[in-house]
Image (spheres, rainbow, N blue to C red):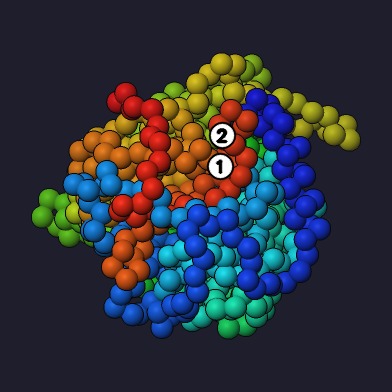
Amino acid sequence: MRLKVLFLGLAVLAAAIVLAACGGGGSSSTGGTAEGTEAAAGSGGNGPEAASAPNIEDWPVFGRDRDNTRFATQDEIDTGNVGELGEAWSTGLGPDQYLMESFPLVIGENVYVTTSTDEVMQINGKTGHINWTYTPEVDFSQSTGVGGYGITVNRGVAAEDGKLFVLTFDNKLQAISEKTGERLWSSQVEDPATGAYESMAPTAYDGKVYVGVSGSEDGVRGKLSAYDAKTGKELWTFYTVPKQGEKWVPKGGGGGTIYMPPTVDAATGTVYVGTGNPAPVLVGAKRPGKNLYTDSILALDADTGKLKWYHQEQAHDLWDYDAESPVVLFDVEINGEKKRGLAEAGKNGLLFLLDAETGEDLFPPVPFVKRAHTPPTTKPTLECPGPVGGSQYSPLAYSPETQAVYVSGINLCMYLKVTYENHNGEKQFAGDRVVPKDTPKTGTFTAVGVNTGKVLWKHSMPTPMDGGATASAGGLVFTGDQQGVLYAFDATNGDDLWQADLKLAFGTAPVIYSIDGTQYVLATVGGAALTASEELGEIGARVIAFKLGGKKLPTGPELKG
């Protein structure tokens, strides 16, 4: 299936990038070039030693902490002085990069970022100088790409014990040195001939690396696996759906794949992960029942992979409503009772607030975009949200100060249509998805109280919100839109306190770190595969850091609500 309007002309450009990447080859190189706007300096502060130094506050895991909250404890930048925020440095990532869905890590003084073609870069967090670049050999030819559109992205690395772990598009898990970028080992996690590919950042914890596979739309069988961080050996695998031809899965069907990093609760030894849609995607006639465990939140034993519980967000999905965004954990008191809570925002436009120990609802699901859908038929039916609506891979942010999660939403309805094709004399079901002509592509940004299940405030945004959010102890929540505008909102009431127009679309959320007493807000920009198109900005990918007193940038349009 193809998004006929949204991706017009995009696959051609992506193919050119893929060919360029395939020709690059190589392993690792040091002393890469940078386009930093501040003078380059020595890297300093490499590795865990610097991360433990008293003058360093970094961002060492995907969501900054193990609960995946994306909450930074720094408060130098706050609601009173955020207007003084300006550019500290900016570094371009090369002319062949135009999609940026990499969520950076910051360890010591170094920023670690990946490109859409699987390079890993170490960048000095004070200056923007690229210290080294690791370029793996990747075969992009066998897989169809993100959503089947011939596009490649990489959403970041994991780190533990001096190693970085990266997944390549052709399904390799590789460990490289955090200090030098030298490759240490490589393991094949799936055969690309199955249609599976990798775009997620892995999760590393307690000597294990947790990895899923992507490609539900092509009938790939979803799984989550744990690998030994020292050797790359597979330790266990949990399959999210049966094999093709078994139980509810028809021949050529499958699904339940994984697009974002799992979340590990160290206290309970539980790994939480969301799963994708069943396949065939829009037609359910050949896959009866609920189609477990697609469109679900799974809680697995972190040591064995044994299923503890599941919560299915969309049974017998006919709309491509993945549970794609990563899980957030939090502690909350509800009616005088302390709970361990879990939040996840689905592509069906609902925020789920669950009991992390049981998977039961803490509150009814909370809608955050327009919802009006019926089962697709052979006639085009307008469905809201469409298959690229709701919340895609966008991470939530959670602030313990406001006891709220912050949800990035996409308001985009689409026409869905069931079609029939003959294959070797047998009638096959297929489907089509089309964005209505002249339909505005807009978004929402919503704060929801985890102790009440109520919307605290909400903004209508001028573009789809893909990248996710980041909150801080300064009373702020940061997010970026598809026009390239970075926003700082008051986390309590939603007031729009500061903007910077970065000219390149957001496909990720910012990170926050401090070096020698200076707090930085860092953004990676360059667009998202989901909604990239010519009208949404220039081609390119950049890493931009902000600090108080930095260079002022122009603002974006005034928000209406």
Q: Earlier in the sequence, mark 1 or mark 2?
A: 1
Report whether 104 appears left or right of 332: right
**Residue corresponding to mark 1:** 527
Q: Measured from the top left, where is residue 4 in percent x and y?
A: 68, 26
| On screen, residue 370 above or below 55 | above
Report whether 470 appears left or right of 165: left
Crowdedness of circle 2 by 10 Å Cα count: few (<14), some, many (20+)? some
The amino acid beneath tag 1 is Gly
Mark 1 vs mark 2, foreground winner is: 2
In terms of depth relative to the viewer, which is nearer, 552 or 507? 552
Q: Residue at x 65, y 25 (%)?
A: 5
| On screen, residue 268 above or below 310 | below
Q: Measured from the top left, where is residue 416 in percent x and y?
A: 60, 24
Measure how far apart labels 1 and 2 are at the Cα level. 8 Å
The amino acid beneath tag 2 is Gly
Are the two marked residues, 1 and 2, in contact with CB atoms closer than 8 angstroms? yes
Q: Would you say residue 173 is visible in this rendering?
A: no
Q: Residue at x 55, y 73 (%)?
A: 164
Crowdedness of circle 1 by 10 Å Cα count: few (<14), some, many (20+)? many
In terms of depth relative to the viewer, which is nearer, 351 or 436? 436
Q: Measured from the top left, where is residue 281 in percent x and y?
A: 63, 37
In terms of depth relative to the viewer, which is nearer, 169 or 524? 524
Q: Residue at x 20, y 43 (%)?
A: 492
Q: Quadrant of the C terminus?
A: top left
Q: Measured from the top left, where is residue 223 in percent x and y?
A: 59, 60
**Residue corresponding to mark 2:** 537
Q: Check the image and name the residue furthest to the front.
A: 39
Callout 1: SS: loop
Q: Quadrant of the N terminus?
A: top right
